[in-house]
Image: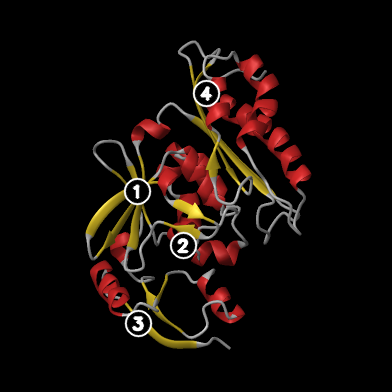
């Protein structure tokens, strides 16, 4: 049984904002694959739910005239993976969200919910970091754009205010054009399991395709919340492909701080950082047009 005191289906984003503003204890819900589990476990028991599941204004994927890609926050994972714009421009993101849970969860779960729950193991989180995503939220105070790098404030926490609704995830053209990307999730099972560690790499090569021009590396479960790897990214710039692949594993360890947990030890996660970073970089280089080293 679910201990819910009320359910309100919002008719618009503004309607949802007003409902949240009027009830400080209300909980926003879209697909419900995270929220309903927390209700059942008692963490959100007794909450009144405000649903944005039916809001078409924040569903779907579009390409703006300036080249930016915009993904509605209530767009389900399955729709993201299969969308032609994602397959052509953001394949790493499509592959990342295709590893969330199982088919049933991916059909209902949304990208907005995946980042709003703030957990470090969210499969979309590290890849959105590697794409320098921007989150557009709307609340009583108006609209604000928040960099993914400013989004997470702690374990399970984000900067979204109670009466704000995440409306769109924006991927700037400069963040995906001419980049090759790849995401690797390591989990104890092939499906229906959260990540023990996730790594997402985006890289752009020099004009002659022999060296790294720009690299963006992001991790899930390598710290209390999703993180980038600034030292590793800076080290990679200008490195030949062979040098980059041979040295990236060691440098990557300087950017992470994984913990011991019942799912995996810190030492295992450090080993995964070394191995998966090198593998993901290799795949990203190939997608960016580099040779197989």
Tag 4 residue: 234
Q: Secondary structure at mark 4?
A: helix
User: Which of the marked residues, 4 or 3, is nearer the chain's N terminus?
Assistant: 3
* Mark 4 Cα shell of 10 Å, populated few (<14), some (14-19), many (≥20): few
Q: CA distance from mark 3 to mark 1?
A: 27 Å
Residue at 47% x, 56% y: name it: 115
Residue at 58% x, 27% y: name it: 232
Tag 3 residue: 8
Tag 1 residue: 146
What mark, if any, has residue 113 been given in the picture?
Answer: 2
User: Which of the marked residues, 4 or 2, is nearer the chain's N terminus?
Assistant: 2
User: Which of the marked residues, 1 or 4, is nearer the chain's N terminus?
Assistant: 1
Q: CA distance from mark 4 to mark 3?
A: 48 Å
* Mark 1 Cα shell of 10 Å, populated few (<14), some (14-19), many (≥20): some
User: Which of the marked residues, 2 or 3, is nearer the chain's N terminus?
Assistant: 3
Q: Secondary structure at mark 2?
A: helix
Q: CA distance from mark 2 to mark 1?
A: 16 Å
Q: CA distance from mark 4 to mark 2?
A: 32 Å
Q: Is residue 289 visible?
A: no
Q: Is residue 248 above or below residue 91?
A: above
Q: Nearer the viewer, residue 109 or 164?
A: 164
Q: Is residue 17 above or below residue 204?
A: below
Q: CA distance from mark 2 to mark 3?
A: 18 Å
């Amino acid at each position: 049984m679910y201990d819910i005191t009320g359910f309100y289906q919002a008719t618009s984003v503004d309607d949802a904002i007003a409902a949240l503003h009027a009830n400080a204890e209300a909980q926003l819900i879209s697909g419900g694959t995270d929220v309903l589990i927390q209700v059942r476990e008692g963490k959100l028991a007794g909450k009144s739910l405000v649903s944005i599941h039916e809001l078409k204004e924040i569903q779907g994927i579009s390409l703006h005239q300036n080249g930016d890609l915009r993904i509605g926050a209530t767009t389900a994972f399955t729709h993201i993976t299969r969308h032609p714009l994602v397959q052509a421009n953001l394949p790493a993101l499509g592959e990342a969200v295709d590893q969330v849970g199982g088919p049933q969860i991916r059909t209902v779960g949304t990208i907005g919910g995946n980042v709003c729950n703030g957990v470090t193991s969210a499969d979309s989180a590290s890849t959105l970091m590697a794409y320098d995503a921007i989150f557009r939220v709307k609340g009583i105070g108006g609209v604000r754009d928040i960099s993914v790098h400013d989004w997470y404030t702690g374990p399970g926490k984000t900067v979204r205010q109670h009466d704000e609704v995440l409306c769109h995830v924006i991927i700037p053209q400069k963040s995906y054009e001419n980049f090759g990307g790849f995401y690797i999730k390591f989990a104890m099972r092939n499906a229906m399991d959260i990540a023990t560690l996730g790594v997402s790499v985006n890289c752009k090569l020099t004009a002659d395709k022999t060296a790294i021009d720009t690299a963006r590396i992001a991790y899930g479960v390598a710290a209390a919340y999703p993180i980038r790897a600034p030292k590793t990214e800076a080290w990679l710039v200008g490195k030949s492909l062979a040098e980059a692949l041979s040295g990236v594993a060691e440098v990557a360890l300087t950017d992470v701080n994984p913990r011991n947990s019942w799912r995996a030890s810190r030492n295992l996660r450090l080993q995964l950082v070394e191995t998966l970073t090198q593998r993901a970089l290799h795949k990203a280089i190939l997608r960016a047009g580099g040779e197989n080293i």
